[in-house]
Amino acid sequence: MKFTEVIAQELVEELYGPPVAGLDVGSRQAKAVLLKDGEIFSLQVPTGINMQKTADALLAELLGLSGLKYENLRYIVGTGYGRVAMSFPAVEHRIVTEISCHALGVHYLDPQVRTIIDIGGQDSKSIRVDGETGRVVSFVMNDKCAAGTGRFLEKVAQLLDLDLDMLGPMSLRSKGPSEISSQCVVFAESEVVSLRARGAAPADIAAGIHLATARRVKNLLSRVGIEPGLAFSGGVANNAGMRKAIEDLVGYPIARFKLDAVLAGALGAAIQARRFSRAQAKESAAPKNEVNVSLTDILNEVGSHERAVTDGITGRHSVGYLCSYTPLEIMSAAGVNYVRLFKMGSSDIVASGEQITQSVFCDFTKSILGAFKEEVPLNKALEKVYTFYTCDCIKKVGEAVGDFFGPSEIFTLPRLRHKESSRDFYRTEIINFKNDLEKLTGRVIAEEDVRDRLKLYNLVRKTLKKISDLRKSDYPPIKGRDFLEAAKALFYLPPDRLLTLYLDLYHRLSLVAPFDRKPPLRLMMAGGIVADGDRRLLDLAEDTLGARVVIEDHCTGARNVSFLLDENIDPYTSLAHGYLDQSPCTRMKPLAERIAVSGELAREYRVDGVLYVYLKFCPCYGQVKHQFFKHFQSLGLPVLEVAMDYSKSDQGQLKTRLEAFIEVLNEERVLSQSA
């Protein structure tokens, strides 16, 4: 078919040029579009087991339709569920997320569209589109649950003894949709079976399933904003029952196109290929901004410290602690080995910890208890566990450690940090902490020793802050992942050794020359705790996608070094004031103050966007996320919400969402630079 038959007339001219192709390999169907001499060639085939073979076969057949040879293609863009497996060595190519491709494809079909519903075999998405450019303004994906996806509808069709393509038309014959209340695939299947057993009409069950799915879609749409100009793309777009259910529930008509909406992603990929071809883009979807500054000495020191504690060869008492409000200065003055218990647990460790807590506790708390339950050597070597608790779940963990595994002591942290009575109370708790350590070790902690450590830790924090400040440069000399690895040492090593290691690292980083390439995108990682070992989001953002995390607004990064202690007053008063004056925890009041600090950090480090990361079921950061989002948006900062656990089963979806977010930020940067 001709460009002029399907593409919006004002955009047709942009598509002319050498032959290019876009391949959208989904979980169930693979689609392809080829642009050649004013014509669009398209094809759709089932996705096989091997994504690359599917792509190769699809492309070969498409080339046959168009009368071209492989070497005639100027550029190929791959997208969709199987995009990570695609490679085309003989042709310049790039991999782009389906979110950007669906937005661009739909825009060229109808520039009036502002919101897209994309339902595929494995996920569903709501995408907000800029009507002027077709770029993604914002997007939301479903979570790992399969409800509201093509796979869900396929399963229901099987339960009703129908072919999938019959499910939609069947639902249109309904006289009254059955009530499907569950939001879970497994339970919804049970409801369908139960409805059949009670004699409900298949058409009513089908209509009920479509309505339940449409409710999930509406929830996604509400998170990006629902307005006229609605489009439906993806593998489920041709399901008439699904289309009607969405229109009825949302209240707006869905746009009709002259090209099959299932091909929107492949069309968008082909248009991306045209743009990359015209700009003579090079291969490599993400520039590599590597800086090889070794952290071997710091990591080796931390490892040696852990082994020494585990083996009990230091001649010192060893304690663990759970929160960054636990004064390091007191533990150092007591002469004990101290280890912060903040390691990410494996799936087995998490499952073991869940036997003690509840399923609605976050994976971090389960990891702590699981490590004790499974007798991880480092945990087993500890004589006592302390916490100055903020999170109520961490308080419960401290109690469970004492109930099941050995001595623990819990101290209370004030929530109203500016009240004088709160500071007096916290000072008392710090002294109680000191007294307990004296009982454990059998030695008195002299006030002079506390003053000594106070001064040393001030120097340590100043140096680590200077290392972080180097990231304010357009060319940060250290990645966010590496900064976290360096900051980790703060929670383990004695201050005199830390100072030597950090001064050396600062000296080496300050000698790093700027890169010979454009500055990377700058990200802030905000939200809940990022555990030791939990680095996959950083690896994706920095190593795979070429961005750089330049500041952390969570309690295991740069936020911990944003305060200094007064060396000229009573040391216990100084500790109480200093620790309470640091960037506050969300448990503290007022919350607006905590949110304002986050925004100030974002502006100070000139970030392009924010990754708001928290663990599922987190009571501190999950429940208040929308207040953070509103503040970031008021500052003009795009935000990606990332609710995580430690299972790693969402790696593919996480990569898709992060890729799309980076694409949005890159487009924002280009637009701002050209303005």
Image (spheres, helix red, strand yellow):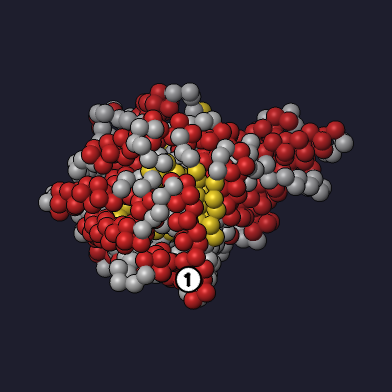
Residue with the most extreme right position:
198
The residue at which mark 1 appears reads as: 423
Q: Is residue 550 visible?
A: yes
Q: Residue at horizontal 60%, vertical 41%?
A: 145
Q: Is residue 275 visible?
A: no
Which quadrant of the structure image shows residue 575? bottom left
Q: Position of residue 613 (x, y in %)?
A: 46, 52
Query: The N terminus is located in which quarter?
Result: top left
> In the visual, does 334 lie left or right of 617?
left
> In the visual, does 341 lie left or right of 289?
right
Q: Is residue 137 above or below residue 654?
A: below
Q: Residue at horizontal 50%, vertical 43%?
A: 384
Q: Residue at horizontal 64%, vertical 33%?
A: 154
Q: Position of residue 627 (x, y in %)?
A: 52, 66
- Identify the amino acid type marked 1: Arg
Q: Secondary structure at mark 1?
A: helix
Q: Residue at horizontal 80%, vertical 45%?
A: 178
